[in-house]
Image: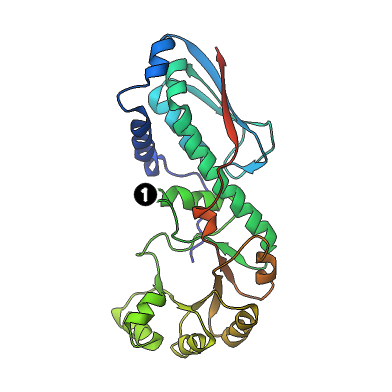
Amino acid sequence: MRTIPFEPLDPALYRETVRRALAEDLGWGDLTTDGIIDEKQRAHGVLIAKSRLIVAGLDIALEAFVQLDPGAKTAQRLSDGAVAEPGSAIAEITGYAGPLLTAERTALNFLQHLSGIATLTRRFVDAAGGRATVLDTRKTPPTLRTLAKYAVRCGGGTNHRAGLDDGLMIKDNHIRLMNGIHEAVMKLRAAGHDMPIEVEAQSLEQVDEALGAGVDILMIDNMSIDDMREAIRRARGRAKIEISGGVTIDRIGELAALGAEYISIGALTHSAAAADISFELEPA
């Protein structure tokens, strides 16, 4: 696991994604807006939180407006990672009304989705109470992983592997295709990768085999509380432990108290509900 400092994303990481999202929505043109809005009409818009949430993806949302109206003026009232209370202004935009209307849904899709991830992540981090590091997974919408993992950081979580080239993890299907964990570990060591080796273990027998092979991290997956407690006891001083599988907001406090270093939660990025945010326009 690598702790990435929380800082704004480089626009190069999302500018093209925003362009493609706008093109997907726009098609041959915004027929409604083009039909009723004068091209010279100007407007002032406010992004407003409708429920308590953690802001994430604000720069990405504003990029959607600016791509369609490069002269639009934006003002952030809150920043990514901040708590937005119901009714609070997140950002304001002033520009030509047509582009603001056309970009509205794309901007909200990014901001609502990413703020939803950040908000759910913060709930899990708070519930863990600092007793274990909350990790995300690779269960992200295709092509949006960089943005989803950024949103996890906005919520106070820590990123697991960014991709298959970002860590060594021997999972259940690898093990089934090999003659056990030990052989898989030996082959990875022989490949010469200078990275910690993590192994997924689904039983105490696999825990013992992985520890015997000298792995660095054990991911104990879908075990009973008693077996997790025993796995952590056996691994103490020999390998770090990551708890995975079936982690809910109601269970994470109990799991964090077991003494594992990490708890990974796929739901952070694959099941977070969109945050409730609106965009309200007035003539300028």
Q: Nearer the viewer, residue 77 or 127?
A: 127
The quadrant in which residue 78 appears is top right
Q: Judge whether residue 235 can be spotted in this image.
A: yes
Q: Is residue 100 above or below residue 190?
A: above
Residue 33 shown left or right of residue 219 in the figure: left
Residue 83 position within the rendered picture, expressed as x and y whole percent measured from the top left: 66, 42
Return the x and y of residue 93 as percentages of the image width and height: 53, 23
Residue appearing at x 59%, y 87% in the figure: 234
Display coloring: rainbow
Name the image quarter holding the C terminus: top right
Residue at (69, 60) in percent of width and height: 127
Q: Position of residue 249 (x, y in %)?
A: 65, 60
x and y, in percent, of residue 10 in the image: 42, 43
Number of on-image labels = 1
From this viewpoint, is residue 6 visible?
no
Q: Could you say whether the residue bearing mark 1 is in a helix, strand or loop?
A: loop
In the image, what residue type sits under mark 1? Thr
Task: Give the vertical position of 276 relative to 259 (above or below).
Answer: above
Instruction: Name the residue nearer the viewer: 50 or 5.
Output: 50
Q: Residue at x 62, y 62 (%)?
A: 248
- Please rate how many residues cluster around mark 1, counting C-alpha atoms within 10 Å: few if below 14, some from 14 to 19, many from 20: few
Q: Which residue is at 43% across, 17% downward?
A: 98
User: Badge 1 is on which residue?
Assistant: 143
